[in-house]
Amino acid sequence: MPEPGHVLIVCTGNICRSPMAEGLLRHALAGRSDALRSLRVLSAGVAARPGEPVSENSVVALRKVGIDISGLRSRALTQELLDQALAVFGMTESHRSIIRMRAQPVPANLHLFREFLPPPAAREIGDPYGGPLKLYESVRDEMVEAIPSVVGYLKTLASQK
């Protein structure tokens, strides 16, 4: 069972985008000197089959920036994961909508991963599933661009605790 106060990142199958974002955010938080360093980062999918390995192109795209996510396995989104989360980040509006429809209660801090970037930045991160490595690298770079704004938001949340 996850510890209360984790960060939860959600996509569809939990084999491409959310594991990549999990690895990137974990890496970013591990490099901090404040309390965010100890914040757990988890991922799940709204339509995940539990136990599936991360897609090879996701693993390769992150390995290219020195992050190993090869040991991650998919997990299905549960109410318990939502209830215990300090913040929940979806990849697209459809993920946020699905969470709002299924969750009782709906998480208070439910956002898109790129939501805190200034306009005209795209808010959604498209699904690279089945695409070439370059597409996965592009998705990775969209996530990397958003990491400082996500960390800034988490810092604000942590200071309110």
Image (cartoon, rainbow, N blue to C red):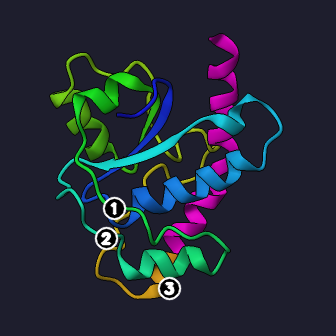
Cα–Cα gap, marks 3 and 2? 20 Å
Q: Hey, what amino acid is under mark 2?
A: Pro
Using the image as rendered, state which of residue 143 and residue 70 is in the foreground.
70
Residue depth check, mark 3 versus mark 1: number of the one nearer the observer: 1
Residue receiving disc 3: 134
Residue 23 in the image, given as x and y percentages of width and height: 55, 58
Query: Which quadrant of the view contains residue 80?
Result: top left
Residue neighbourhood size for the residue with mark 2, other residues' Cα within 10 Å, grouped as few (<14), some (14–19), many (≥20):
some
Task: Report the magenta residues as a range.
Answer: 138-161
Residue receiving disc 1: 73
* Residue drawn at 67 percent across, 75 percent down: 65
Contact between marks 3 and 1 (CB within 8 A): the answer is no
Residue 30 vs residue 18: left or right?
right
Query: Which quadrant of the view contains residue 24?
Result: bottom right
Q: Earlier in the sequence, mark 2 or mark 1?
A: 2
Residue receiving disc 2: 53
Residue 38 vs residue 113: left or right?
right
Residue 153 vs residue 84: left or right?
right
Label 3: element kind:
helix
